[in-house]
Image (spheres, helix red, strand yellow):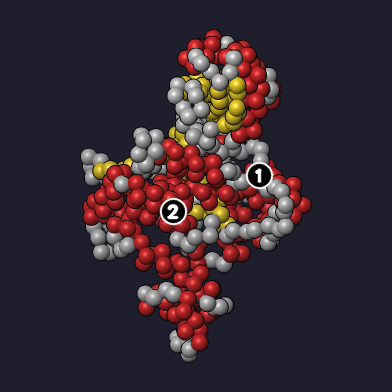
């Protein structure tokens, strides 16, 4: 299926018109179209089977970011998020990126780690060698627990052993099962494999196995994206492209050297990534944990992206981070809207989903940096946030647009100001 991700004048359409357009482009059937327009698309009975103590369901706005071109293919990007400006900023940066071919992406594979912690050892280095001597038997034992994964070409590939000779609980050895989980996120698979080898590792080492669980620092499952912008692409009415690029690079360097700025910088990246993870039914907490741990891998928390100036003056951005996402299992198969989101994206593998996610994160990051380097973050953000303020103040129908316009014109976006506007006379 070939998709045109350009969503010209999409913002001016009604929600029903937008839904009809996406349904046509993504070739949704009548039942799938109904899911988009019907509140409570997740049946209560299904929700009750997903988690404990269910009393209802909780909805977020579901939007589609447009204009994304990833490795030469147009992609519509479903995003479930409550914060204004995120979808608009990502779409605009994607639109500008098309002039230089969009986003180029790659991945390192689909490998996850399961950790097996061993304590009660007097010879931790000897225990390490003993585990490695039995590598093949341990790999075979792990693989015996998931024949389906083996049939799909996945499975335990290797074993690493890490030694911590001096901890508050004595010497510690941690065996890592390196597992190819294919198109699954992989948590259940690797946890099961870790449980299966625990007894044999105790027998091999003479120690006591404690934790047997995956690591969310998925540093063998990285997704990468790169994008390029010519100076004239980024120019505004007030700033030349060269000025914008200089400001963006200065803002990036600030995040690279200062963890206080890096925390906000990386949160902006996750503003783009998390809504995709949520919309597709994936584990956004796992992605967040891996991202921030990876940002600290040098021993100091820093930026997940880089922005630099090419020899010809272009702005070049890159991102690399763990992306443990799946297309099978969990809510990706249970939640009707998660399945629909994946169909709209038209991704064929978990790796492709991860690549789209980091491309959106890179676009979102530039949207924030460009605003910070020029007009400031509040001008554009607050203009979009004004709709939420108008609604909170009690505006409805045509009053919403009128109150938004008045607040933006006055550059005064506050609930009490919106209330005063609604209490006063209407002008043209």
Residue at 68 percent of width and 24 percent of height: 146
Q: Which residue is mark 2?
A: 90
Q: What is the secondary structure assignment of the residue under circle 2? A: helix
Residue at 46 percent of width and 27 percent of height: 167
**CA distance for labels 1 and 2:** 25 Å
**Residue nearer the viewer, 27 or 323:** 323
Q: Is residue 153 visible?
A: no
Residue at 66 percent of width and 28 percent of height: 192
* Mark nearer the viewer, 1 or 2: 1
- Residue 272: percent from left, percent from top: 47, 50
Image quadrant of residue 210? Answer: top right
Image quadrant of residue 367? Answer: bottom left
- Residue 176: percent from left, percent from top: 53, 24
User: Where is 216 relative to 204, above or below?
Assistant: below
User: Where is 179 relative to 185, above or below?
Assistant: above
Q: What is the secondary structure assignment of the residue under circle 1? A: helix
User: Where is 410 relative to 84, above or below?
Assistant: below
Q: Which residue is mark 1?
A: 331
Q: Is residue 371 visible?
A: yes
User: Where is 105 relative to 83, above or below?
Assistant: above
- Residue 168: percent from left, percent from top: 48, 29
**Residue nearer the viewer, 68 or 265:** 265
């Amino acid at each position: 299926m070939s998709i045109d991700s350009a969503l010209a004048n999409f913002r001016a359409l009604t929600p029903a018109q937008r839904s009809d357009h996406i349904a046509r482009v993504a070739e949704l059937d009548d039942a799938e179209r109904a899911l988009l327009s019907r509140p409570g698309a997740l049946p209560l009975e299904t929700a009750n089977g997903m988690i404990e103590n269910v009393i209802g369901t909780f909805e977020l706005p579901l939007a589609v970011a447009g204009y994304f071109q990833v490795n030469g293919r147009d992609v519509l990007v479903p995003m479930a998020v409550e914060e204004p400006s995120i979808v608009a900023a990502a779409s605009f940066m994607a639109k500008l990126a098309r002039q230089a071919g969009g986003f180029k992406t790659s991945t390192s594979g689909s490998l996850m780690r399961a950790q097996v912690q061993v304590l009660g050892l007097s010879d931790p280095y000897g225990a390490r060698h003993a585990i490695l001597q039995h590598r093949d038997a341990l790999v075979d034992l792990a693989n015996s627990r998931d024949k389906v994964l083996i049939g799909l070409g996945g499975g335990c590939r290797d074993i690493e052993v890490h030694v911590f000779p001096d901890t508050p609980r004595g010497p510690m050895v941690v065996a890592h099962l390196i597992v190819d989980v294919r198109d699954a996120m992989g948590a259940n698979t690797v946890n099961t494999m870790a449980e299966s080898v625990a007894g044999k590792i105790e027998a091999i080492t003479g120690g006591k196995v404690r934790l047997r669980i995956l690591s969310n620092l998925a540093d063998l499952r990285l997704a990468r994206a790169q994008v390029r912008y010519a100076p004239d692409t980024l120019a505004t009415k007030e700033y030349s492209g060269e000025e914008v690029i200089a400001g963006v690079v200065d803002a990036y360097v600030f995040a690279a050297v200062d963890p206080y700025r890096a925390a906000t910088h990386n949160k902006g990246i996750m503003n783009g990534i998390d809504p995709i993870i949520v919309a597709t039914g994936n584990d956004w907490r796992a992605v967040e944990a891996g991202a921030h741990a990876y940002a600290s891998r040098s021993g100091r928390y820093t930026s997940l992206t880089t922005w630099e100036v090419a020899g010809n003056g272009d702005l070049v951005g890159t991102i690399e981070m763990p992306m443990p996402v799946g297309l099978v299992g969990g809510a990706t198969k249970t939640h009707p809207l998660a399945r629909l989101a994946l169909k709209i994206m038209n991704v064929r593998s978990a790796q492709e989903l991860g690549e789209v996610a980091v491309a959106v994160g890179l676009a979102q990051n530039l949207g924030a940096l460009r605003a910070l380097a020029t007009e400031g973050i509040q001008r554009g953000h607050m203009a979009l946030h004004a709709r939420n303020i108008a609604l909170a103040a009690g505006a409805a129908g045509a009053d919403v647009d009128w109150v938004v316009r008045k607040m933006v014109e006055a550059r005064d976006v506050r609930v009490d100001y919106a209330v005063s506007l609604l209490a006063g006379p209407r002008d043209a």
